[in-house]
Amino acid sequence: MTGCGWRVRPGQGPARHDRPDVLACASTGVVNCERVTTSAQSELLGVPVALLGLGWFLAMTALCSPWAWRSSVPWIRTARLAGAVAGMVFVLWLVYAELFVIRAICLWCTAVHVCTLGLFVTILWHTAASPTVTGHSRLKSESSRR
């Protein structure tokens, strides 16, 4: 899933923030990457959102590496889940900004949002289904109580 973000993100990297004319996306109508990537919402505290996304995908790649998935270190699991939740909250804010503030949709951004949602669902499912400290799956424990 993090590979999805790495593949899509170069299309909207920091250079694209400065040069919206190189985006392979419509620049008129509702689908308007130029309007989205040059809006006030395309930066957070002066940092391009695309660059923040690259940093997030880099961190999530490490937290979702095979080594990290097999690790029994509790903070890795917690950091992975917290990162997924933070990414999804940020995506929801960005979608809100696109739909209601900017009133335009960027296809590149939408592809990254879909990748983030997929990663969020995968991590949430794995966290719910994986064994707890006692060795019982949270999902099995919940279903056995009913």
Image (cartoon, rainbow, N blue to C red):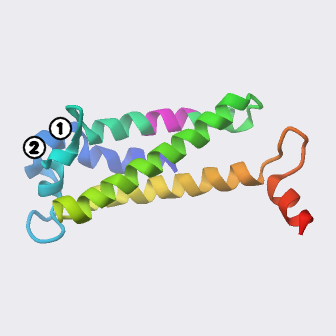
- Pointer 1: what residue? 15
Residue shown at 83% from the left, 43% from the top: 132
Q: Position of residue 61 (x, y in %)?
A: 52, 37
Q: Is residue 59 magenta?
A: yes
Label 2–label 1 contact, CB within 8 A: yes
Q: Position of residue 73 (x, y in %)?
A: 74, 28
Distance Cα–Cα, label 2 vs label 1: 6 Å
- Up the image or down, 94 lies above or below 45; here it is below
Amino acid, disc 2: Arg
Residue 112 visible within the image: no
Residue shown at 39% from the left, 53% from the top: 91
- Pointer 2: what residue? 19
At label 2, counting other C-alpha atoms closer than 10 Å, the crowd grade (few under 14, some 14-19, many 20 or more) is some
Q: Is residue 130 magenta?
A: no
Q: Position of residue 55 (x, y in %)?
A: 39, 33
Locate the C terminus and report the quarter of the image it occupies. Answer: bottom right
Which SS does the magenta portion mostly show? helix
Q: Which mark is residue 143?
A: none
